[in-house]
Amino acid sequence: MSSDNKDLCTIAIKFDPPLKLAEGPIYRAKDSTFHFLDLWDDQSYIVKLDPKTADRDPSVPIIKQPFQEFTSVKYFSTNRPGYIAGYYDGIAYIEEATGKVHPLEKLVEDRSVRKMNDGVVDPKGRFWIGEIDVKTQKDIGLGFKNYPIGRLWRYDPDGSVHLMLDGGLAISNGLGFSPDFKTFYLNDSFGQLVYAFDFDLEKGTITNKRIIRDYRGTKIEPDGLVVDVDGNLWIALNGGNAVIQMAPSGEILKTIPVPAKLVTCPAWAGEDRNWLLVTAGTFENDNGGQIFKIKTDTKGMPDFEFTFPE
């Protein structure tokens, strides 16, 4: 650990009582605000940050809104005052000021079978979002009884919808891209696998699915991920009390302890994008349920925004 506190995990935003299961973090540089969800409390949050330190600006109140629909992931829009989002049944536009949900595409036929989960926007402004296989989720810890049926979708700025993977996912999480946009990454948390795919940016297609990290046989679930400008992945290890930096080969470069068991998702933040803000849940009265921060010796890849059809 270096003297300038790089790779040290501390609390950036303190909550009392703790958050139940913080998830879906995104940072907006133009106003230095941090947006995230508490999935087990059905709340969304917006927090003003100091862009230099990634700490909360105490002069600005935290904005808290109850969900109008269950929401699993949100990304900013270029042309509407709100987010492209995943809600239980599909894809929606959510107004930032009011939290009002405007469903765009219903993709889930039966809520007892599937629900939407994590997503990402690619450099062409396409929104990728994966599903949870609900039955597999209920069977977690028992071993998979059947081939998981969670799917991966792509929603384009022209309003078209494309099925990218027709099953094979237990819980889709941690979507991201390499700096050259030739590789697409995806975590299957309940499958306990980190996948890589060949990615064609122009066509928006993925091929050559392969495992680059395997946590089967452990109690660790790879959850959210982001990618740095050097091409390394930063992955939240749910059940592993840590964030790791991992090379594209799957080699673990760093393990940074986090004082929470349910470590869920990292996000790049700050004016130089060298801070990781990490969401976490609360487990048996541990030190989770806070927003943690890690100062890194690299910078994060940019986040992309979605342009809604006019």
Image (spheres, helix red, strand yellow):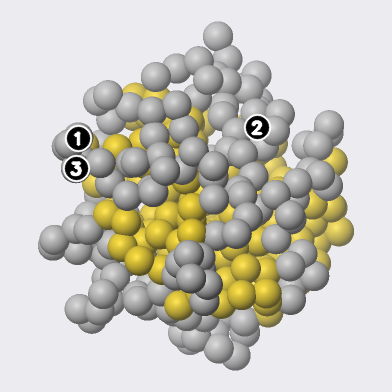
With 62 as the anchor, is 227 left or right in this view? right
**Which three-letter amino acid code belongs to the residue tagged 1?**
Val
Task: Name the residue nearer the viewer: 116 or 234.
Answer: 234
Q: Residue at x 36, y 36 (%)?
A: 33
- Report the residue that reaches farthest toward the left: 17
Return the residue at label 2: 126
The quadrant of the picture occupied by the C terminus is: top right
Q: Secondary structure at mark 3?
A: loop
**Quadrant of res 253:** bottom right
Q: How far from the left and from the top, in percent, is residue 160?
A: 65, 25
Q: How far from the left and from the top, in percent, is residue 279?
A: 38, 59
With 273 as the anchor, is 33 left or right in this view? left
**C-beta proximity under 8 Å, tags 2 and 1:** no
**Which three-letter amino acid code belongs to the residue tagged 3?**
Pro
Task: Name the residue nearer the viewer: 257 or 281.
Answer: 257
Q: Residue at x 46, y 33 (%)?
A: 29
Return the residue at label 3: 58
Alpha carbon separation for disc pair 3 and 2: 35 Å
**Which three-letter amino acid code belongs to the residue tagged 2?**
Arg
Res 127 visible: no
Q: Secondary structure at mark 2?
A: loop
Return the residue at label 1: 60
Q: Secondary structure at mark 1?
A: loop
Q: How many marks?
A: 3
**C-beta proximity under 8 Å, tags 1 and 3:** yes
Figure check: 51 above or below 202: below
With 245 as the anchor, is 135 left or right in this view? left
Figure check: 123 above or below 176: above
Q: Residue at x 66, y 61 (%)?
A: 233
